[in-house]
Image (spheres, coloured by chain):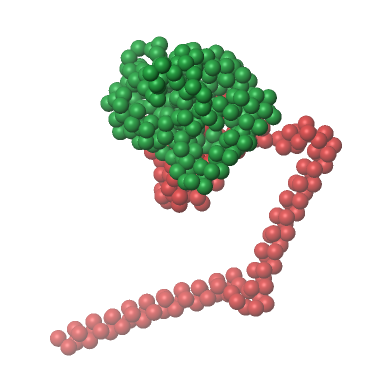
Amino acid sequence: MQDNPENTTHFGFKTVEENKKAELVADVFHSVAAKYDIMNDVLSMGIHRIWKRFTIDCSGVRQGQKVLDLAGGTGDLTAKFSRIVGSKGEVVLADINDSMLKVGRGKLRDMGIEGNVSYVQANAEELPFPDNHFDLITIAFGLRNVTDKDKALASIYRVLKPGGRLLVLEFSKPIYTPVQKFYDFYSFNILPKLGKLIANDSESYQYLAESIRMHPNQDLLKEMMNNVGFEGTEYFNLSAGIVALHRGYKY
Amino acid sequence: MPLQQLLCGLLETGVNQLHQLDSSAVKKRKQLDGTIIGASLKELNIPLYFVISEQQIDILTNFEGDPDCYIRVSFSALNKLQDNHQLTTLIKTGELEVEGDIQLVQQFAELLTNMDIDWEEHLSHKVGDVIAHKFCYHAKKLHQGTLKQLKKVEKQSALYITEEIKLAPSGLEVAYFSEQVKMLASETDNLIHKLDKHLNANELAGK
């Protein structure tokens, strides 16, 4: 993406060397993994559950299919997918961060979800799966943190079966100015303080707010998906564009 | 539409919370493990898909595969779904339409409506045995009392309408009236019969 010649990339509003970003992101998530679910509920006021529900309704997933939940974190989507695809299907929960993966695995096992779920620590830019393997790939609130987004999208495209689809759930740009104003105030003034209060970690949540601003907007992301080969790409604005769900097909 | 997702989420949470309290729910869900049942109310026509697994019930508003069974039912027939004997009647009257395995319908209805929850037991963990018992005892009494009162009010207002203000006729009056109507009908039939006979006779005589 917006790489300048010296091989740097953005980490929130800071500019860092490209090969350092993954490490910095990893630190953020190592630090928030334990309280990730609680923080999600508090910071989004529970609305993230509705966004995820909408994602599942758009997935068209059926019994017996293979699903990859990329950057799946603590496994909210994986849990649902695992129940929908049933015993003949397969769900892979992949995350680059082993702390998140461990929390996710612990949570899913406690819920009694086993058998059709496997856990893989993987980098979205170089997915360790064969070509044309998955019916559905979701990446919810993860693409933002990937260093090279084009490479990640191309890698996703490669492992997706023809006829399969990709769902990208990610923060985006609010479509109304008043919402934008309120949202900016909330994310730069309130969010880090809540982060400090609950998870005792304001930097991570400062990074969250900044990284959201640096993420491509709805149309740009759609363009990026089209560039790597996705077809029929469309997006749905949720909560006035604070979050957008992009959907693309591989034919 | 996010509103649909919101309602769906609330419904799902509600059902699963109730199931947590019901000791027999796990067994019932196990029987239906892996089945997907689509259902919609005839009045609303919003399809809901129930994904039943051992762990819980998931409710989706959109499902692109083939559900094991699809039910369209009218609101008034919801209560009667549990009863195995009434299913065929409901289908005949058009209140229930089923595509797929009909046996699933009854199991599914039982799963959702026939929850065996011992409220007193669950309450006793929170507030202690004595209070829980007292509370449930009085709640039951209150419930019975209200039902009794309702029946009384119903009876009294019926009497008031038929006897005091004579707005509607009483049962006996209705019966008497319909008897009279019936008699009138048979007399009219007789008369027509007679007239026919006479007319026919005249026609024959005229020829």
User: Which residue lies at the image location 30% right of the left edge and 26% below the top edge?
Assistant: A227
Q: Position of residue A173 (x, y in %)?
A: 46, 38
Q: Position of residue A229 (x, y in %)?
A: 29, 25
Q: Quadrant of the N terminus of chain A?
A: top left
The image shows residue A226, relative to residue A29, as above or below, that is below
User: Which residue lies at the image location 64% right of the left edge and 26% below the top edge?
Assistant: A202
Residue A155 position by quadrant = top left
Note whether residue A104 is visible. Answer: no
Q: Position of residue A94 (x, y in %)?
A: 47, 17
Chain coloured green: A
Residue A201 position by quadrant = top right
User: Which residue lies at the image location 40% right of the left edge and 36% below the top edge?
Assistant: A218
User: Which residue lies at the image location 65% right of the left edge and 78% below the top edge?
Assistant: B165
The image shows residue A115, relative to residue B150, as above or below, that is above
Residue B9 position by quadrant = top right
Question: How many labels sit on residues?
Answer: 0
Between A154 and A89, the one lying in front of the other is: A154
The image shows residue A137, relative to residue B169, as above or below, that is above
Between A190 and A244, the one lying in front of the other is: A190
Q: Quadrant of the C terminus of chain A?
A: top left
Q: Residue furthest right?
A: B130
Q: Position of residue B144 (x, y in %)?
A: 73, 51
Q: Residue furthest left?
A: B207
Between A191 and A108, the one lying in front of the other is: A191
Chain coloured red: B
Note whether residue A174 is visible. Answer: yes
The image shows residue B6, relative to residue B144, as above or below, that is above
Q: Residue furthest bottom?
A: B206
